[in-house]
Image (spheres, coloured by chain):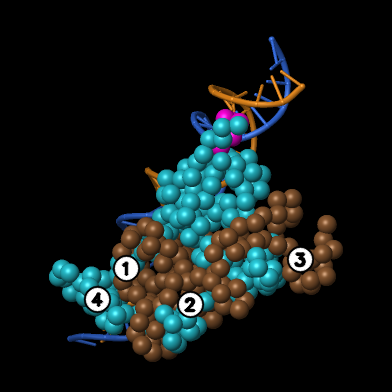
Chain colours: A cyan, B brown, C blue, D orange
Amino acid sequence: MGQLRENLKAVECSLPAALEAMGERWSFLILRAAFNGLHHFEEFQSELGIARNILANRLARLVGHGILERHSLPEDRRKIEYRLTEKGYALLPTMVALRQWGERWETGVPASPILVDARDRKPIAQVKVRAHDGRVLEKQDLVWALPEDVLDDKAAEAAE
Amino acid sequence: MGQLRENLKAVECSLPAALEAMGERWSFLILRAAFNGLHHFEEFQSELGIARNILANRLARLVGHGILERHSLPEDRRKIEYRLTEKGYALLPTMVALRQWGERWETGVPASPILVDARDRKPIAQVKVRAHDGRVLEKQDLVWALPEDVLDDKAAEAAE
DNA sequence: ATTATAGGTGGCGATTCGAAACTCAACCTT
DNA sequence: AAGGTTGAGTTTCGAATCGCCACCTATAAT
């Protein structure tokens, strides 16, 4: 059973791995709340209206995946602060892209609050797929390829 | 990233709307398969290993949200072709961003197949958040703002 | 010492998921 | 025309998950 049928059969995509970390029901909304500056259990709970056990489960899972960090605050040891890690911040383009899509294709109205450039307070641009040199690529400009077919790739096809 | 704590109460974000369309368990994987050129029920089923009832439910839901179109093929009227709509294609930046995140932070290895520029067959760039003039923005360059603070410069002064 | 707050757990009914069997119309073979 | 196969679902039913609510524990405020 070692035959590669079409060009797409032997897919090893990182999307399932990403979804294992972020694909559950409230994860993205918790992340958005964290990006919006929320840090505490009760803040998330009242902002999102999520059930407390589910919230506890999701926070633990996000911490387990290294997306949030759990800090006990010294000045009030009841308080737990959930803070985005670098890995969590790295989800910003995904979140912005999804939100922009919802804005354009679902709600049809500008969301609030909006993300603006701190320098000039103008709204950020639409998130796009771009070529290595920065050109914006539309769907007709894109092709799926196997790693060994890619030009500037040097190695990584060791075995088989 | 700056926050406006008080004013975040009346948040009207499009993320929940986007997640209503795409937030369920298999939706993104079905979308990826559709981007990879799969079109038929049995193709999705055998590629993803998803239960048939769930697949039927998700396809109907994606069609209901206008992300896929359902076409009965004239040359074999048993066959149903699911095709991405423009709205479905518009999820490409989101999907690429999520996949790139998974590649960088979860699997650690380049995914396969990869998206390349059809012109030079080089891999696409990392999806980034950019200012309206194209500058790449990092988290310290971003601020949340209410619409009335950005639409007009005069309103920015007037607000509270 | 009592009360309030922060961050959870546990119970339990309702919903959803998943694997496998079943349906059913449309094609294919003879 | 008969019988078989294929494509796209639907049904069934047990398992897992969700969500509301009450409760618990440690800490802080009065």
- Name the residue that disc number 3 marks: B149
Residue A129's tag is 2
First reached walking from the N terminus: tag 4 or tag 2: 2
Q: Give the residues in magenta.
A: A76-80
Q: Name the residue at the right extreme.
A: B158
Task: Kindly state the secondary structure of the residue where label 1 is placed.
Answer: loop
From mark 3 to mark 4, how far is it between C-alphas?
49 Å
Q: Nearer the viewer, residue C26 or B63?
A: B63
Residue B76 visible (yes or no): no
**In the rendered image, residues at marks 1 and 4 fall on the same chain:** no
Q: Name the residue at the front extreme.
A: A119
Q: Comparing marks 3 and 2, which lies closer to the viewer? A: 3
Given the image, what chain letter belongs to the residue carrying mark 3? B
First reached walking from the N terminus: tag 1 or tag 3: 1
For badge 4, the amino acid type reads: Lys
For badge 1, the amino acid type reads: Pro
